[in-house]
Image: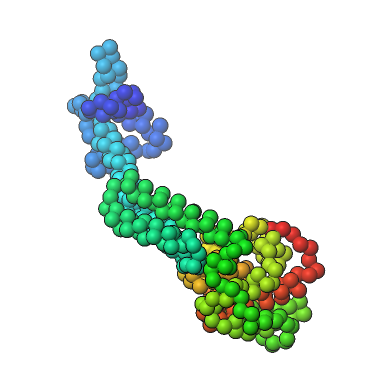
Amino acid sequence: MCAHEQDWSAPAGPVMGASNKTLEDRWNIQNARRVLRELARWGMIIPFCAKGNGHRSYRRTASGPIGSGWSLAPLRILVKSIEDLVQTEEHLRMKRIELPRRTTDALRSASTLLRSVTDCSWANEAEQKLGMLRAQRDQLRNADIAELQAICSDAEDFLLEVEQLLQSAIRCPDFADESSTRPDDTVHYQYNDSTNQGESSSSAEEEYAHDGRSLPASRSLGDTSKPGFEDPYGIIRSGFSWRETSWLFPFTHDLINLRHGPTRSTPHELARLIGVSNNIADASVAALGIAATTLCLLITGQLVAESKIHKSADAYMRGIVRKAADGDLNIGHTVFARRRTAEHKPLVAC
């Protein structure tokens, strides 16, 4: 209908030489003349070697194709222009939106992680490298896409390096000593079952036991910014293991795997699952760290699943961050309460 394949690259473009009857049969339309008139009105086809009687034809000869009818050259140019425009738009999107966003997100996440380990021996060197990457990002804002891809790759590699260092530090027995958080021998932590009626949506440590009572909020642990608080939120003293996650927090079953502990993306994944905004999750990571934030989100999610939060999950997590700022957050109490609630359930590794 539109000439042969090689005619698409001819200067005049492919020629539509089919009759109206053929076009109506092939296009399944009733008035081919009107359709062609509309295409011509919009400049998508133009007459080519038009005959006086209006008939159209096309055939190949030894000397080349001979045709009379409509040339599709404008339509071909339009399609090529649209394809070029799509490539240009994609190039600009990568250069001005995607690559800068990925670079900034990686550097911001790395900065958040480093704020929680400022006293570690490798933190200063990592901070210096972070500053260099930020300076490179700012200098290359108008660079070509290859340079932007290079700085984005460097930023994401740096974030991965910080995550690995942090995970290694957390698993290291000397991590507490590096962070200058020796326990205060004058503080004696106690866990009890004293009854406290009602539930507050503003603290992570208030949790319901199996008999319907809520465990009391922990007493203040003092100023956690001072050295001497190896375990300010009671997580280590509670003996919590990430393998307990699906046992203590059943709502996570088949939703998220925390058997090997949380990663940088875990707080955001959990926040999306339970309806907590990313801003609140980021604030919690900055205030508590990844592990404590993950536990607080697990606690919040379980309470949401059990319909025990009277306000929103967002408001509950904001209360947790406030409690941490006041030094009155003890996640260990909640872990003990969850164990009491789950005593009759089999332990299933997540």
Give the image quarter of residue 134.
bottom left
**Could you tell me how many numbered marks the image carries?**
0
Q: Is residue 297 visible?
A: no
Quadrant including the N terminus: top left
Give the image quarter of residue 242.
bottom right
Q: Nearer the viewer, residue 244 or 302?
A: 244
Q: Is residue 13 left or right of residue 116?
A: left
Residue at point 20% right, 26% down?
A: 49
Task: List x then y, in percent, for residue 45.
Answer: 25, 36
Residue at point 33% right, 31% down?
A: 20
Quadrant including the C terminus: bottom right
Residue at point 25% right, 13% down?
A: 63
Q: Nearer the viewer, residue 216 or 39?
A: 216
Task: List x then y, in percent, for residue 139.
Answer: 28, 56
Task: List x then y, in percent, for residue 313.
Answer: 57, 74
Q: Which of 272 and 126 is in front in this view?
A: 126
Give the image quarter of residue 75.
top left
Colour theme? rainbow
Q: Is residue 233 left or right of residue 46?
A: right
Q: Is residue 134 visible?
A: yes
Q: In this view, does 287 lie to the left or right of 20?
A: right
Task: List x then y, in percent, for residue 308.
Answer: 65, 77
Q: Nearer the viewer, residue 87 or 199?
A: 199
On screen, residue 41 above or below 296: above
Q: In this view, does 330 lie to the left or right of 107?
A: right
Q: Residue furthest right?
A: 344
